Amino acid sequence: MPEILASEEVRESRPLFSQGVKVGNTIFVSGQVAADRGGNVVGKGDMTAQTHQVIRNLRAVLAAGGARLEDVVKLTMYVTDMARAGEARAVRLQYFKQDPPASTGVQVAALGHPDFLIEIEAVAMVTTS
């Protein structure tokens, strides 16, 4: 049975979608954007600030399922301007320093709010030791 994940640190997403879903030891995190828990855009026009917020949101949802960023095996990054993707990659390197996850980068025409520059979704495998 899937376990619905939610973090109080991340903007409420229901009833439209779940922040994350855990099935067995696999966690699927919905695309996270640069919004704080109040739904306010963080870092308008600033890809670096937005990427930091997105990763903070990812980390919070992962924690709700007992996982860490180190457990991420796949990331999909959506950006509105591929010319700025390097800024996002530089931030990602600060969080995924070694053994980076499999990744896909896609340019999209728009995201859910005109001020969002980036959205990232993740898949993680929780290991028990």
Image: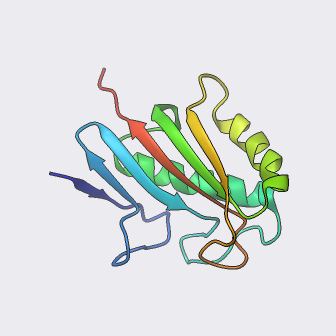
- 119 displayed left or right of 94: left
Q: Position of residue 69 (x, y in %)?
A: 52, 38
**Foreground residue, 88 or 127?**
88
Q: How many marks?
A: 0
At a point 49% along the width and 63% down the height, the residue shown is 9
> In which quadrant of the rendered view does residue 120 lie?
bottom right
Which residue is situated farthest in the left direction here? 1
Q: Residue at x 75, y 49 (%)?
A: 88
Coordinates of residue 23 in the picture (x, y in percent): 25, 45
User: Percent x, y for residue 66?
Assistant: 35, 41
Q: Is residue 15 above or below residue 119?
A: below
In the image, 50 versus 74, the foreground residue is 74
Looking at the image, residue 74 sits to the left or right of residue 63; the answer is right
Q: Quadrant of residue 57?
A: bottom right
Question: Residue 65 at what x, y percent from top left?
Answer: 34, 47
In the rendered view of the protein, which quadrant contains the C terminus? top left
Residue drawn at x 78%, y 50% is 85
Classify residue 84 as left or right of residue 109.
right
| Residue drawn at (70%, 79%) of the image | 114
* Image position of 118 with respect to 85: above or below: below
- The colouring scheme, among rainbow, by chain, secondary structure or one colour, is rainbow
